[in-house]
């Protein structure tokens, strides 16, 4: 029986210098889809080398992925394109592993497609054969009405991605049976106002994924039981006076519980602190941008050590007639935002923001998906001599037992998203696991079959 070695993938991790010395390059354009516009862009790692960050994107009637090479040259690969009606288009796509299968550790794809003219709306998956050849679309649902957002999370601890869709005022759950087949939709919440969003996080620290969404000028959350069931919606009573468009859920003040940062329709960014019992009270307004509207927000880690919380904030706002502004808000790890760094792009609105070390020089970068292009602001101010191995030693991730046989427990104290690769003694990746909770247990028993 071979020993299983655990090596850390570093696709979503990085380290950076102190905020007072943070500098970045001007905009470097990685892609360009003019005259089309991106509907969604996500980071993923489809190719065999987890050091290289790829992108999964939708624009017009196309679902594509972008392969990054060691020179940060980007190549587009078409996964699917749809036709019919006057405006067939993909709304969103997510990359995730649909089957908990060590023999194929590559990400599969979940996508939402609609064509309003012919009332054709589909939730589909594409499976990856392990060489980034994708199947034709497998239809999960063709009965959705007005779907507007797609969220992927493992709500029942089987390491297979489940699907949440906001559709026509309801949150629908499609539960993965473990083989990439999905149950028909279950309504987990209704009466959601436009514009609905769905976030998943362990809000109450019981290690089970919860659902957080907007309602009227407030948020509501549904406690997960870890088996795919959710409790009744509970209103958070934030006291917002306009619709909340976006939220981040992180321990922003470093006291061990999850806090909430909101952006509302008047484009103010506010911090609400958790008293430890999921009672959230307004702390302060972090940022406001006049005459603009908010389009994106992402957590980052720019000012601290390798192991510190991703509690800095990237925001993207679009102003009337002006180029969009990306702003990095630096947290002192106690919930005080002590520095503001602004980036200008030549494109139009911001579709998504990523706090990643895109070129693996240990210096955190800002990557923005704008409507026409994915652009990169290269971090230029931090120590570039630290090796990835040294960085891994600084990580607070720990594993037990060692060696592992049936199960492997991962301690991930900061709860931030990380990719963990499990390699056998020959260096072959036998499993890739996305860790996004404080404690996660991985079933290794099927890794030994046939070894
Ligand atoms: Ca699951
Ligand atoms: Ca929970
Ligand atoms: Ca907190
Ligand atoms: Ca970098």
Image (spheres, rainbow, N blue to C red):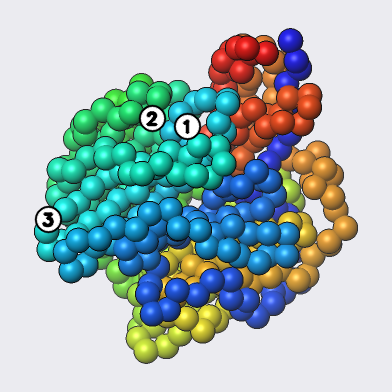
**CA neighbours of label 2 inside 10 A, class few (<14), some (14 to 19), many (20+):** many
Residue 245 appears in view = no
**Which residue in the protein does label 2 denote?**
180
The answer to whether residue 373 is left or right of residue 213 is right
Closer to us: 67 or 219: 67
**Which residue in the protein does label 1 denote?**
205
- Label 3 with label 1: CB-CB less than 8 Å: no
**Which residue in the protein does label 3 denote?**
119
Q: CA distance from mark 3 to mark 1?
A: 41 Å
Q: Residue at x 40, y 57 (%)?
A: 63
Q: Residue at x 35, y 23 (%)?
A: 177
Q: Residue furthest bottom?
A: 321
Q: Residue at x 23, y 47 (%)?
A: 122
Residue 354: % across, % down: 55, 60
Closer to us: 145 or 35: 35
- Asked if residue 343 is positioned above or below residue 398 in the image, the reply reads below
Q: How many circles with numbers are drawn on the protein?
A: 3
Q: CA distance from mark 3 to mark 2?
A: 26 Å
Asked if the residue at label 1 sits under 8 Å from ligand 2, the reply is: yes
Quadrant where the C terminus sits is top right
Say what secondary structure mark 2 lies in: loop
Quadrant where the N terminus sits is top right
Residue 126 appears in view = yes
Q: Residue furthest right?
A: 385
Q: Residue 440, located in which quarter of the rendered image? A: top right
Residue 198: % across, % down: 32, 48
In primary-sequence order, the first of circles 3 and 1 is 3
Say what secondary structure mark 1 lies in: loop
């Amino acid at each position: 029986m071979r020993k299983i070695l655990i090596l850390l993938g570093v696709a979503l991790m990085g380290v950076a210098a102190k905020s007072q010395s943070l500098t970045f390059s001007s905009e470097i354009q990685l892609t360009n889809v003019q005259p089309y516009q991106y509907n969604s862009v996500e980071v993923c790692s489809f190719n065999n080398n987890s050091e290289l960050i790829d992108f999964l994107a939708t624009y017009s009637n196309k679902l594509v992925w972008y392969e990054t090479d060691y020179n940060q040259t980007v190549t587009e690969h078409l996964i699917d394109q749809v036709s019919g009606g006057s405006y067939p288009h993909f709304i969103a796509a997510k990359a995730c592993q649909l089957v908990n299968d060590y023999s194929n550790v590559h990400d599969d794809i979940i996508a939402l497609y609609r064509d309003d003219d012919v009332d054709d709306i589909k939730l589909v998956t594409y499976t990856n054969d392990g060489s980034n050849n994708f199947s034709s679309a497998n239809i999960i649902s063709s009965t959705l009405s007005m779907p507007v957002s797609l969220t992927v999370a493992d709500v029942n601890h089987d390491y297979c991605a489940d699907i949440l869709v906001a559709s026509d005022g309801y949150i629908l759950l499609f539960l993965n049976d473990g083989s990439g087949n999905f149950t028909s939709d279950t309504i987990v919440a209704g009466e959601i106002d436009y514009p609905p969003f769905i976030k998943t996080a362990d809000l109450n620290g019981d290690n089970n994924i919860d659902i957080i969404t907007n309602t009227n000028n407030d948020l509501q959350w549904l406690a997960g039981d870890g088996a795919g069931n959710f409790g009744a919606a509970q209103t958070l009573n934030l006291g917002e006076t306009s619709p909340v468009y976006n939220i981040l859920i992180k321990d922003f003040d470093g006291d061990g519980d999850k806090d909430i940062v909101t952006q509302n329709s008047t484009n103010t960014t506010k911090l609400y602190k958790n008293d430890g019992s999921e009672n959230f009270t307004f702390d302060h307004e972090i940022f406001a941008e006049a005459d603009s509207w908010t389009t994106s927000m992402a957590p980052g880690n720019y000012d601290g050590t390798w192991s510190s919380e991703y509690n800095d904030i990237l925001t993207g706002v679009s102003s009337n007639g002006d180029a969009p502004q990306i702003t990095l808000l630096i947290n002192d790890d106690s919930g005080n935002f002590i520095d503001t760094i602004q980036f200008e792009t030549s494109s139009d609105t911001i579709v998504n923001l990523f706090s990643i070390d895109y070129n693996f020089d240990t210096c955190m970068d800002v990557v923005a998906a704008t409507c026409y292009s994915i652009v990169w602001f290269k971090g230029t101010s931090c120590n570039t001599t630290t090796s990835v191995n040294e960085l891994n030693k600084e990580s607070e991730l720990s594993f037990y037992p060692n060696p592992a046989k049936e199960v492997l427990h991962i301690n991930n104290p900061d709860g931030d998203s990380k990719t963990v690769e499990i390699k056998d003694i020959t260096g072959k990746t036998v499993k890739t696991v996305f860790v996004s909770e404080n404690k996660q247990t991985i079933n290794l028993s099927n890794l030994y079959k046939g070894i």
